[in-house]
Image: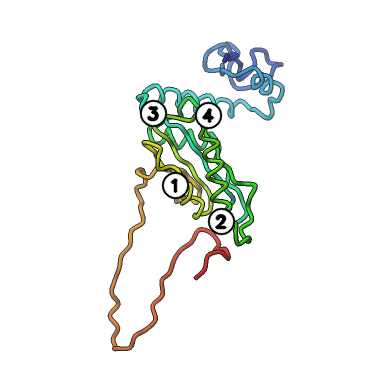
Amino acid sequence: VYGELAHIVAHEPGGPRGNGKVPYDERETIDNIIVLCHPCHKDMDDNPDKYPEEWLKEKKNTRERNAMMQQALPDTAARQAIVFTAPIAGKGIPVSEHDIRKALFDSNLFPGPSPSVNIELMDIYKENDSHFWSSAEKELSVRFARNMQGVSSKEGYAIFGIAPMPLLVKFGSLLTELPNTTIFNLFRAPERAWCWADQNSRKDDVSFELRRYQSPSSEIRPKALVLSLTSDIVERVKA
C-alpha cells in the first residue's frame, strides 16, 4: 500500500483549484497536502468542481483527528465491525464505512485491521409470503456462517443492524458465541436525524411512570394505551 502527496490547491494558479484561498507561498506546506492513492489523486485533480477546496480540507482534518484519536487509544479498543441489513417496509437503509468509523470513535473505539463483515438480505424481500420469515431466517444463518468464515477478533466486535425486528432477533441469536460484542443501535436524535450509539452511551433512556386512576364511581371504564411510533405499522403487525 502506498500513497501520493496531493495538493489541495494546486501549486500553480492554472492547476486544479489553483485559484483557491491558500496563499502561493503556503501551497507546499503540510496544511495544503493530502495523502491519497493514485486513482483518488487523479480523480480529485481531473474533477476539481466535484472536490472543492473546503470539502477536501474538511476530509483531511477529519481523517487526521481520527488518526490521532486512534493512536491515543489502547489496542484493546479495536473492534471488528459486523453489519446486517435487510429492507424495512420495502426500503433498504445502507450503513456506510463513515457511519461505522464515526460511531466507533464517538465511543472511544476504532475499526480493526480487517474490513467490515457485511451480511445483506436485500434480495429476498417478500414479506407478504406466509413462509417469508422462516425462509429469511434460514438464509440469514447461511449467509452469516459463510461471511464469518475466517473472521476473528481477540479485542471484540462492533455490531450494526438495520432490519425488521424478527430478523434482528435471529441475528442476535447468531452472535452468542462472539466474545466482547458492542451493540450499536440507530436512534432518532433530537434534531430528527439518525445517529448510532452503543448500548451504554445513551443518556436519555426511556422511562415509564405508572399511575393508578381513581374513578369517582365504581363503574369500570375501558383503558387506552397510547404509543408514539417512528414508522408506519405494516400488515404483519396484528393488534
Q: Are marks 2 and 4 in contact (CB under 8 Å)?
A: no
Amino acid under disc 2: Trp
Q: Mark 3 sits on what residue?
A: 154
The reply, left or right, for residue 42 in relation to residue 106 is right
Q: Mark 1 sits on what residue?
A: 172
- Crowding at dot 3, Cα within 10 Å, few <14 / some 14-19 / many 20+, comes out as few
Amino acid under disc 3: Lys
Distance from label 1 to label 4 (Cα)?
Answer: 21 Å
- Crowding at dot 1, Cα within 10 Å, few <14 / some 14-19 / many 20+, comes out as few
Question: Which type of secondary structure does the marked residue at label 3 adopt?
Answer: loop
Rendered location of residue 105, percent (x, y): 42, 32
The disc, 3 or 1, on the residue closer to the chain's N-terminal end is 3
Q: Mark 2 sits on what residue?
A: 133
Q: Mark 4 sits on what residue?
A: 115
Distance from label 2 to label 3 (Cα)?
Answer: 33 Å
Amino acid under disc 1: Gly
- Crowding at dot 2, Cα within 10 Å, few <14 / some 14-19 / many 20+, comes out as some
Rendered location of residue 138, percent (x, y): 55, 49
